[in-house]
Amino acid sequence: MEHKNIKGKLLLYIDNELSQPEMMEVKTHIDVCADCREHLTVISGLWRLEKVQKQEAPRYIWTRLAAEIKEYEHNPVLFDIFYSRKKFAYIFQPAVMVILVFISVLTGYFGGNFLSREINGNQVISNNEQVARVFYLDRLETEHISNAMTIASNENGEEILP
Amino acid sequence: MQDISDDILKQASKGDIQAFEEIYKAFSGFVYSSAFRISGNSEDAQEITQDVFFTAYKSLKEFRAESKLSTWLYRIAVNKALNFQRKKKLNQWLSLDFLLENKPDEIPHSPAYNPLKELEKSELERIVQKAINTLPDNQRVAIILSRYEALPYEEIAKIMKCSISSVESYLFRAKQNLSKKLIDY
């Protein structure tokens, strides 16, 4: 626990930003703890790295910026409308997506029911009922084949494998 | 950082594009550099830099020289970079991109680049940069402006629109958090 506590203060220790008693506490611990001393060496290396040189912005940023300014100067009002539309796209995009999903679900629900009514002519049945009927007919057909096979097997005196 | 004469500033605020280019040349380096540090990659930093200067061009008439031009530009850069990152996170979340593995952050290198010599240094820098990227916004901005841009606390306070003691507090907490994040290295 003490090691973790000491390691958690090392950057402040390196920059001499701890209070005097805390600086003493860290120093005393580091003098006797090889693990924390090694960690201090690594952290110092990380922290005191030569600062990365300031970067030159790529030249083409100016080319793009100059073109943007030219476009803006050509018609500031139109440009601002277009620009704000671009900004609002962050809000509109998800909103349009949610609306589209909602419309798709509704279309699927009502469209499905409508088609089932059309197929069955005057007889009005729901989707679930139609599914149940198809399932029931399938079972009837299976049972019918199975019965026919049993009869054939009995007549010839041997089993007919499907 | 170069200084800009009042004449150039006046001309640029009237819409003179050549005068504005002088301002761009003088300050694009540090705007790009801080945008890069905050956003963590060069493509975003380029877009932020362009946006910062375009905003500056449009708002230069309102600049009253109460603070230095560099401080004003820094403030725009920091706000744009933080907003850009928030929007990007939101977009990634909406497009489910966050499920993909993140690209490792790039580290800019000096023009006299020696791959072998710089490899270890870049790796170490990447570790610190990654840890910095996980800090809360205020702490991150304070540490970037202080460590990489070497700005005095007073200027950082002006950029962040807070008191000097708040900057000191952000930096203290940032270093405390970074020490904890770097425990495993």
Image (cartoon, coloured by chain):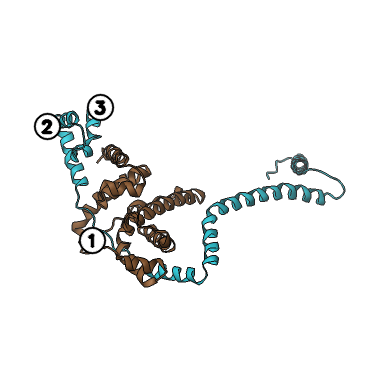
Q: Which residue is mark 2?
A: A31
Task: Tell me, by letter, which chain the rendering colours cyan.
Answer: A
Work out whether residue B10 or residue B37 is closer to the camera in this orientation and state it: B10
Q: CA distance from mark 1 to mark 3?
A: 41 Å
Under mark 1, the amino acid is: Ser
The answer to whether marks 3 and 2 mark residues whose Cβ atoms lie closer than 8 Å is no
Q: Which residue is mark 1?
A: B110
Q: CA distance from mark 3 to mark 2?
A: 17 Å
Above or below — where is A105 with respect to B165? below
Classify residue A35 as left or right of residue B174: left
Q: Dot 3, how many residues are within 10 Å of its Cα: few (below 14), some (14-19), or many (20+)?
A: few
The answer to whether marks 1 and 2 mark residues whose Cβ atoms lie closer than 8 Å is no
Please tell me if label 1 and label 2 are on a single chain: no
* Chain under callout 2: A
Q: Residue furthest right?
A: A122
Select label 1 or label 3 by which is in front. Answer: 1
Residue at left offset 35%, top offset 47%? B160
Which of the 4 quarters of the picture holds residue A82? bottom right
Task: Tell me, by letter, which chain the rendering colours brown.
Answer: B
Would residue A111 be visible to someone looking at this image? yes
Above or below — where is B55 with respect to A24? below
Which of the 4 quarters of the picture holds residue B32? bottom left
Residue at left offset 21%, top offset 42%? A43
Under mark 3, the amino acid is: Met
> Which comes before the other along the chain, label 3 or label 2?
3
Q: Which residue is mark 3?
A: A1
Residue at left offset 84%, top offset 45%? A124
Work out whether residue B44 or residue A79 is closer to the camera in this orientation and state it: A79
